[in-house]
C-alpha cells in the first residue's frame, strides 16, 4: 500500500471533513536530536553500552520492514532526515491537505520503552516527552503529545505521569502492546491509577519487544506475520485487562487500542462474554460481562482499517462495536497510512461518520 | 428430534485416557518398564481442569467409556460417525522418543478400546511433533487402518505450524488423504500468549482465538498450501467468529507485502476458504440471531463449517449444537456434506 499523494487542495477546504488523527509518529531529525533533553550521564551510558532491548539487535527491528523506516516512500522530507522528522513537511503533506484539526503524537523507536536498563528507560522517556513539547506541540497548536512511560518500571512510569499531569499539551499516557507480562496484571495497576487520577486515557499502541514470541507457538518467519499478529497481541492484552478486572477496579480508566485494527473486537467480546459466563466463578471481581466494561471504557483507533471483500461487512462490524468506540487515525508517515478521504466505505449517518473522524476523539481527549 | 439435527458426522469428540496405566498393554517392554520404574506422572494437560465448568457438561460424564459416549452423545444426536480426538499430553513431552512410544500406545488403545467397540467411531492420529520423522512413521503405520481419518497436532508448539520443519508431516498426511487437524491448547513450550502467562483458565481459553490466528497466519504465509495443494487443515474447537476479521487483516497486508511471500499467488482469504475447515463448537456467537447470518455472509462460503459437539466440553445444552435459526440446507451441509468432503476416508468406509 504505497500511497501516492493526491495533489494538494483538490477539494475546497471548507467542504473537507475535519479529522482528529489519533496516531501520528514524530521522528527525530538526527540520531542525537534527543541530546538537548537528556542529561549527559545518560547520553554517555547509551553511547558506551547501547540501549539493549529484549531483541537480538543493537538497533532496528526483528523483522525487516517492507520499505525503509516502514514509511511511505513520499514521506521523506526534502530537507533531509527520516520520515516524520520535519514539522513543516508534515504540515504541508498531511495536516493541511487532510484537514487534521488535532493530531495525537505517538513516538516510537528508541524512546526508552522496552529498554532492559530501567534507569536509562525512564531517562529516555522523560527526554522524549520534553522533546515532544519543545519540537512539536510548542510549534503547532494542532498537536498533542503522549506521555511516554517506561511501563516495565511502574514506579518510574507513575512519576512521569505525575510530572505531566495537568499539562494540556499531553493527551494520553502511551504504552506498547508487547509487554513483559499481560497488561491486566497487577504490577501495571499503579500506571492506570495514575493515568486515571491525571484524567489521561491510556493509549496502548501495537509493537515493542517484551521478549516473548509473537505467537503462542513461537516466532513466525515473516514481517507480514508480525504485522498480522499485532491484532492477536492486542486481543490478548484486552482479554487480560478485562478479566483481571482493571476497569472494575479503576472505573475512571479509559483505554485506547492503537494501530491494531478493530474488526476483531466484536467477536472477541462475544467470545469473552460466553466463556466468562460459563467460568465466572474464577473471576469474581467482575460483576458484569466483560463486554460491558469494554463498551464503557475502551476505544479503538481505526488504522490499519480492515478491508473486507464487501464493504457492507466492515459496516456490520462498526455497527456491532459502535460508531462511538472508534477514533480515526492515519499512522502518518508509515506505509500503511489510511487516507481519511478514501478509507472508510460509505455508510453510517453523517453524525456517525463525524463521530468517528472527529467528535469521539474530541470528547475523549478534551480537544476543542 | 428435528431430523435436520440428527444423523450428522460429529467431527470433534474427546475420549480421555483414564490413566496412564490404561496404556501399559500398548507399550513395548522397554517403555512399559520405564513408565512403572520411573513412576511417570499422568499426562493430563492443564487445559481442562477436571471440575471446571467448561471441561464437562453436567450431564456428560463418559469421556472415559465407550458405552457412555454412545449413550450420552452418539445416540441422542443420532450420530452416524464421530471422530475421536484424544487430547492426552503426548505432544508436551520434552523427550521425543518417549513421545513417539506414547503416541503409538494412544493410537493402539483408541483402535482397540474405542474403534473396535463402536462402529460409529473414527479417530485422529496422535503423533509426536517433537520429531517429524517419528510423526511420519506413526502416520504411515496408522494410515493402514481406514478408521484413522486425520492427523492431530497442537495449534501452538515449539515452532509455528507453517515452519518447514513440519512439512514432512504434511506431505505424509496429504499422501494418505488425511486432513491435519489442529486442536486448541499449547504445549507450553512458549507462553500461551505474545505477552506472557495469563492468570486465569478462562483467560487462556479465550486466548486460544489469538493463538489460532497466529497458527493460521503461519500455515498460509509459509506456503504450506502452495506446496501441498491437496492438503486440508481443520481447526478444532477454535471458535469461528474471529475468522472473517482475521482474514480481512491478513489479506490487506498480503496486498502490501506480497513481495515477501511470492508463493501466495492469490488472496489469503481465498486460500483459507479452499483449504481450511473449522468445527462449529464453540462458535462464539452473540445473542442476536441476525448477527449469525451476518457472520455466515462474512465467512463467504458454506463449505467451511463442520458439525461438532466438542464432547464432553460444555458449550451448549440439550442437543442444540447448531446455532438457532440456521437454514435446513446449511444445517445439512455442516452436519453431513462438509465433513464428507473434508474427510475422504469417511466416504471410503461409510456406506
Image (tube, coloured by chain):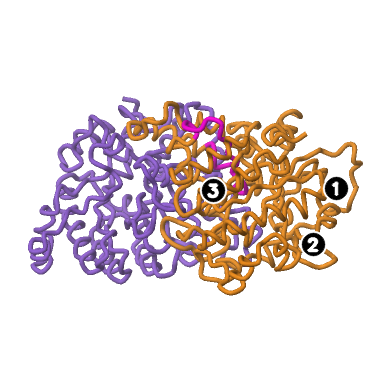
Chain colours: A orange, B purple
Report the residue marked by disc 3.
Answer: B246
Mark 3 or mark 2, which is nearer to you? 2
Q: Position of residue A80 (x, y in %)?
A: 81, 68
- Kindly state the secondary structure of the residue where label 2 is placed: loop
Is the residue A233 above or below the residue A275 in the image?
below
The answer to whether A187 appears left or right of B145 in the picture is right
- How far, Cα to Cα, is label 1 from label 3? 34 Å
* Quarter where residue B189 is shown: bottom left
Mark 1 or mark 3, which is nearer to you? 1
Q: Position of residue B238 (x, y in %)?
A: 41, 45
Q: Chain of mark 3?
A: B
Foreground pick, B185 / B224: B185
The answer to whether A106 appears left or right of B339 in the picture is right
Tell me if residue A236 can be seen. Answer: no
The dot on residue A96 is 1
- Pointer 1 and pointer 3: residues touching (CB < 8 Å)? no
Report the residue marked by disc 2.
Answer: A74
Q: Label 2: how many residues lie within 10 Å, few (<14), some (14-19) or many (20+)?
A: some
Tell me if residue B87 can be seen. Answer: yes
Foreground pick, B126 / B47: B47
Q: Label 1: how many residues lie within 10 Å, few (<14), some (14-19) or many (20+)?
A: some
- Kindly state the secondary structure of the residue where label 1 is placed: loop
User: Quadrant of the image for the C terminus of chain A?
Assistant: top right
* Quarter where residue A161 is shown: top right
Give the magenta range.
A247-266
Q: Chain of mark 2?
A: A
Amino acid at each position: 500500500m504505497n500511497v501516492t499523494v493526491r495533489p494538494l487542495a483538490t477539494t475546497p477546504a471548507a467542504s473537507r471533513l475535519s479529522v482528529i488523527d489519533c496516531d501520528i509518529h514524530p521522528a527525530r531529525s538526527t540520531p542525537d536530536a534527543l541530546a538537548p533533553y537528556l542529561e549527559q550521564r545518560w547520553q554517555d551510558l547509551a553511547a558506551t553500552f547501547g540501549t539493549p532491548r529484549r531483541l537480538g539487535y543493537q538497533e532496528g527491528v526483528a523483522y525487516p520492514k517492507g520499505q525503509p523506516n516502514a514509511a511511505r516512500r513520499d514521506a521523506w522530507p526534502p530537507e533531509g532526515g527520516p520520515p516524520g522528522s520535519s514539522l513543516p513537511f508534515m504540515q504541508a503533506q498531511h495536516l493541511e491537505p487532510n484537514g487534521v484539526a488535532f493530531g495525537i503524537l505517538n513516538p516510537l523507536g528508541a524512546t526508552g520503552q522496552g529498554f532492559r536498563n530501567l534507569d536509562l528507560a525512564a531517562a529516555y522517556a522523560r527526554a522524549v516527552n520534553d522533546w515532544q513539547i519543545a519540537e512539536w506541540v510548542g510549534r503547532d497548536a494542532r498537536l498533542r503529545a503522549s506521555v511516554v512511560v517506561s511501563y516495565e518500571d511502574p514506579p518510574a512510569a507513575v512519576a512521569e505521569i505525575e510530572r505531566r499531569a495537568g499539562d494540556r499539551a499531553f493527551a494520553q499516557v502511551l504504552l506498547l502492546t508487547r509487554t513483559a507480562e499481560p497488561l491486566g496484571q497487577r504490577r501495571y495497576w499503579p500506571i492506570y491509577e495514575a493515568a486515571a487520577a491525571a484524567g489521561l486515557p491510556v493509549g496502548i499502541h501495537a509493537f515493542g519487544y517484551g521478549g516473548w514470541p509473537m505467537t503462542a507457538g513461537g516466532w513466525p518467519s515473516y514481517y507480514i506475520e508480525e504485522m498480522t499478529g499485532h491484532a492477536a497481541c492486542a486481543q490478548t492484552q484486552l482479554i487480560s485487562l478485562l478479566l483481571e478486572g482493571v476497569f472494575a477496579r479503576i472505573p475512571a480508566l479509559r483505554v485506547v487500542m492503537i494501530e491494531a485494527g478493530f474488526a476483531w473486537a466484536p467477536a472477541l467480546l462475544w467470545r469473552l462474554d460466553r466463556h466468562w459466563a460459563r467460568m465466572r466463578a474464577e473471576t469474581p471481581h467482575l460483576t458484569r460481562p466483560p463486554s460491558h466494561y469494554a463498551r464503557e471504557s475502551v476505544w479503538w483507533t481505526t488504522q490499519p482499517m480492515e478491508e473486507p471483500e464487501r464493504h457492507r461487512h466492515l459496516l456490520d462490524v462498526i455497527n456491532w462495536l459502535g460508531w462511538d468506540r472508534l477514533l480515526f487515525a492515519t499512522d502518518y508517515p508509515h506505509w500503511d497510512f489510511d487516507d481519511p478521504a478514501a478509507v472508510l466505505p460509505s455508510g453510517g449517518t453523517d453524525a456517525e461518520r463525524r463521530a468517528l473522524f472527529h467528535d469521539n476523539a474530541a470528547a475523549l481527549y478534551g480537544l476543542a | 428430534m428435528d431430523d435436520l439435527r440428527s444423523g450428522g458426522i460429529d467431527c470433534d469428540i474427546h475420549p480421555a485416557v483414564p490413566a496412564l496405566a490404561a496404556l501399559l498393554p500398548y507399550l513395548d517392554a522397554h517403555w512399559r518398564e520405564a513408565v512403572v520404574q520411573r513412576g511417570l506422572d499422568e499426562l493430563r494437560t492443564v487445559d481442562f481442569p477436571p471440575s471446571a465448568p467448561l471441561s464437562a457438561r453436567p450431564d456428560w460424564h463418559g469421556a472415559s467409556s465407550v458405552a457412555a459416549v454412545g449413550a450420552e452423545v452418539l445416540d441422542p444426536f443420532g450420530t452416524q460417525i464421530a471422530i475421536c480426538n484424544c487430547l492426552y499430553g503426548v505432544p508436551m513431552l520434552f523427550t521425543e522418543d518417549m513421545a513417539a512410544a506414547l503416541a503409538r500406545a494412544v493410537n493402539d488403545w483408541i483402535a482397540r478400546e474405542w474403534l473396535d467397540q463402536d462402529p460409529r467411531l473414527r479417530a485422529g492420529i496422535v503423533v509426536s511433533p517433537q520429531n517429524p520423522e517419528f510423526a511420519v512413521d506413526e502416520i504411515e503405520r496408522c494410515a493402514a487402518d481406514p478408521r484413522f481419518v486425520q492427523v492431530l497436532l497442537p495449534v501452538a508448539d515449539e515452532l509455528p505450524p507453517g515452519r518447514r520443519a513440519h512439512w514432512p508431516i504434511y506431505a505424509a498426511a496429504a499422501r494418505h488423504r488425511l486432513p491435519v487437524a489442529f486442536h486448541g491448547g499449547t504445549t507450553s513450550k512458549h507462553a500461551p500468549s505474545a505477552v506472557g502467562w495469563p492468570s486465569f483458565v478462562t483467560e487462556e481459553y479465550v486466548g486460544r482465538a489469538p493463538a489460532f490466528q497466529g497458527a493460521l497466519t503461519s500455515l498460509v504465509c509459509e506456503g504450506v498450501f502452495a506446496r501441498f495443494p491437496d492438503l486440508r487443515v481443520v481447526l478444532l474447537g477454535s471458535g469461528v467468529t474471529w475468522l472473517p476479521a482475521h482474514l480481512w487483516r491478513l489479506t490487506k497486508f498480503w496486498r502490501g507485502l506480497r513481495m515477501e511471500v511470492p508463493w501466495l499467488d492469490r488472496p489469503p482469504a481465498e486460500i483459507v476458504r479452499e483449504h481450511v475447515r473449522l468445527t462449529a463448537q464453540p462458535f462464539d456467537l452473540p445473542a442476536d440471531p441476525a448477527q449469525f447470518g451476518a457472520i455466515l455472509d462474512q465467512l463467504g462460503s458454506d463449505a467451511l463449517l463442520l458439525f461438532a459437539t466438542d464432547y464432553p466440553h460444555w458449550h451448549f445444552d440439550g442437543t442444540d449444537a447448531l446455532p438457532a435459526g440456521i437454514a435446513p440446507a446449511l444445517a445439512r451441509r455442516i452436519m453431513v456434506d462438509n465433513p464428507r468432503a473434508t474427510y475422504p476416508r469417511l466416504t471410503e468406509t461409510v456406506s
